[in-house]
Image (cartoon, rainbow, N blue to C red):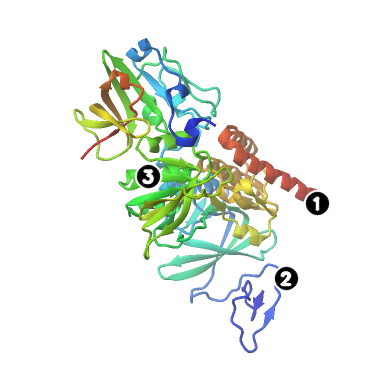
Amino acid sequence: MQKYEKDGVLSLEDLKLPSKEQLDKGVAIIECVQEIPCNPCVDSCPVKAVSMKDINAVPVVDFDKCIGCGKCIGICPGLAIFVVKTKDDKALISLPYEFLPEPIVGQKVKSLDREGKIVGDAEVKKVVKNGKTMIVTIEVEKDLAMIIRNIRVEL
Amino acid sequence: MRVNGIPNVRTCIAPLKEGIHVEIQHKLASLPDAKFENIAKQTIDVDVLVVGAGPAGLCASIEAAKQGAKVLLVDENLFIGGQLVKQTHKFFGSKAEKAGTRGIEIAKELDDEIKKFEKKGNIILMLNSTVIGYYEGDGEKHKLGLIKRIDYNSQLFEINCKTVIFACGAMENMLLFPGNDLPGVYGAGAVQTLMNVYGVKPGNKVIMVGAGNVGLIVSYQLLQAGIMVDRVVEAAPIIGGYHVHAAKLRRCGVPIMTSHSIKEAYGDGKVEGVIVVKLDEKWQPINGSEEKVDCDTVCLAVGLTPATRLLSQIGVEMRTVPEAGGYVALHDDSMKTTVNGVYVAGDSSGIEEASTAMIEGKIAGISAALSVGYDKKAKTLIKQYQKVLEKLREGPFGDKPRDAKNKIAKFLEENYAKI
């Protein structure tokens, strides 16, 4: 039994991680580790960087091919895709968000980890609407690139 | 039993009166001609009757109509879509199964298709209507009774059809615990109806029971509606639903406690809290692990049972298949039951989910149309959809429905061997 099957939280060991150079370029991190019959991420990729052996396989990202465009973020029914891009001592994280109020560019929001614990503050850099799913890009400290996976907009 | 000439009477609850005439009813009853609520009975003749306008029934109707059959689609609700209209999350699967599209949007797309066929005259849609029973048919045709509710009156219809597809969905399971009758204890489907269909908050602080996909998805929808979900408790040692759904909840700060359940709900006239208890490996409560949790709502997402009573009344061969969620109609891979012209699709044929229900519906619709002589590459299409089903059930989450369908196929084989 995997730990995430018990508590619903992935650890970094469960994921295939990009190199420093790949992170600097900006790549999609797909946090989808179970074999479920689903593949829209594969179809959404404009550079064919996401592949799957068959519809039940786990998606694999070719970090060299991935251009970090984020098209897959809004299509994933599991809201399991994030794009992470590092620059100097900061990291930009693009994440799917489906709550009100809508975050606003420039706003300070709380940054949360995979357990929903508040880690610190983040600044909203970009908000793109993909149907009713927003794709929110926030800036955090570089060492939090693989930690922060959610935001909370405080009223 | 027949009482004073009226068929299908439950004599165990019929009042005993002087001169009452009680007979054993040896066969199916004929549908009486008497006026019902003072409106004369109407008759409708179609090729295919589809009972239930959820994902399976909608797809069955559309495919049967595409083949050229004349279809009557019936649902007891005021609108079509079944559970789809409550599904505000995006569907899984592949492009062909509308992956990435929210259930409510899929319902709209299917509604548009139904309307097109309504205009052409291939589909008759009857909402606010309930199929009440199966009666003795004329010749090869099946005869079913239907009540259409019109304002506060009802009208009786006699439906004569060459084939009938039951896509009646499922009923939610209840859980036994003291206080489960307190106001504030809901099924997850009821919570979704209140919240997503009627825009009513079911409560302010919820304990979710069950970490299957339904429990996880409804918890997330509660959060989106601005309602606090205190925790999800799950009796099994692992989360039954997809990890991605669990992860969505966890990163919002909702704990998921596996090997935990609720011992009781308490409160004065309504739910004021529950006692959560930890379970051992044998799923037995561990003494001393009780924790009191304040809440005003308990939401139960502890599985579904196929709705099969009409199938049972018709007399199709049924078996209990735990993996299918209970008592189900035996059916082959064209969704045909053991009675000629009677088909089943979706949760009624075994509990699964909406994507596979839609495909089963398509197969049932084409099979039914084909059986009465409509054939626009019907066999090729059926084979194609059977392959898609097989693919979708290939992964580890397909184990249970695959086992269910295999058992049903085996029972069916045994049944035919007996004859």
| Position above or below: A126 against B197 | above
Q: Amino acid at mark 3?
A: Gln
Alpha-carbon distance for marks 2 and 3?
50 Å
- Which residue is tagged 3? B221
Q: Quadrant of residue A75?
A: top left
Location of residue B19 in the rendering, given as x and y in whole percent from the top left corner: 65, 88
Find residue B418 and name its label. Answer: 1
Pair 1/3: label in front: 3
What amino acid type is highlighted by mark number 1? Answer: Lys
Q: Residue furthest front?
A: B288
Residue type at the position of mark 2: His
Q: Nearer the viewer, residue B361 or A65?
A: A65
Q: Counting residues from the N terminus, which is met first, the one under dot 2 or under dot 3? A: 2
Disc 1 versus disc 3: distance between alpha carbons?
49 Å
Q: Position of residue B331 (x, y in %)?
A: 67, 48
Residue highlighted by disc 2? B26
- Above or below B140: residue B409: above
> Does dot 2 land on a helix, a strand or a loop?
loop
Q: CA distance from mark 2 to mark 1?
A: 23 Å
Residue A90, quarter of the rendered image: top left
- Sequence-first tag of 2 and 1: 2
Residue at 53% in and 32% down: A37
